[in-house]
Amino acid sequence: MIKYVMLVLWILGVAPSAHAEGSQYDTLTDLNLEITLQESDILLADNRVPTSTTSVPNIPDSAFKKPVFTENDLHMYLGLGSMAMGILAAVSAGDAEGDPDLLNTVHYTAAKASWQLGAAAVGTGLWAHWDDFHLEDGLLDRDNLHVILGTLGVIGYYLAVKQAVDDYNDPNVGWPNESHSNAGMLGGAAMLTAIVITW
């Protein structure tokens, strides 16, 4: 039984030392085991992370600045240009009436430019915003409506110019009738709405 008591006392660090004189006791905490630990060798219990010598890269602020001109800017300016040419075609229609050289008038040139710029706007819009168009969001979703109305606007501009040129070149007609302007006005309204809903 004494052996067990001595073993427990020794484990607890209070057992008498074999080399002690008198009643001196050495505890385990008094032992110098000459063990040295480097902080970088272990992960400390308080979750301190050893200091890293890795340097942070110096990234210039210019890497995070928006470019001066983006694909979206190109799309926007082409759409606005198409709308502006459509308006110019509408206001210059009276000056072109009766002009024997219709294909060299401001009205025709602006009308042709309106559908060509509009087609370029649709193309760049599909390129820059393809991921924004989702039919599952419904036709009345703002992005979907923008695509649909913009495309209808360009089709309206194109049909107005095509009908006018066909009438002008037809010897039986000789001059574009007023119906071509209906397609142009509907195209203009669709284009304007497409621009306004995303402005």
Image (tube, rainbow, N blue to C red):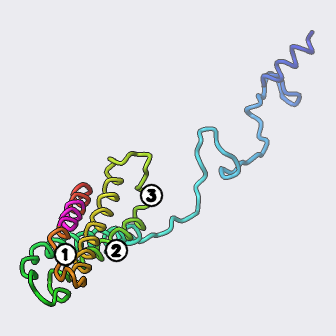
Q: Distance between the residues labelled 1 and 2?
A: 13 Å
Q: In this view, does 147 lie above or below 1?
A: below
Say which residue appears at 65% left-offset and 50% top-offset: 39
Which is more N-terminal, label 2 or label 3?
2
- In the picture, measured across the screen, residue 42 lies left or right of residue 11, that is left
Q: Quadrant of the N terminus?
A: top right
Helix, strand or loop under label 3: helix
- In the picture, measured across the screen, residue 169 lies left or right of residue 49, that is left
Helix, strand or loop under label 2: helix
Q: Residue 131 carries which label?
A: 3
Question: x and y percent of residue 13 in the render?
Answer: 78, 25
* Magenta-drawn segment: 182-190
Question: x and y percent of residue 11 in the render?
Answer: 82, 23
Q: In this view, does 86 lie above or below 189?
A: below
Q: Residues within 10 Å of mark 2 (few under 14, many from 20)?
A: some
**The magenta stretch spans residue 192:** no
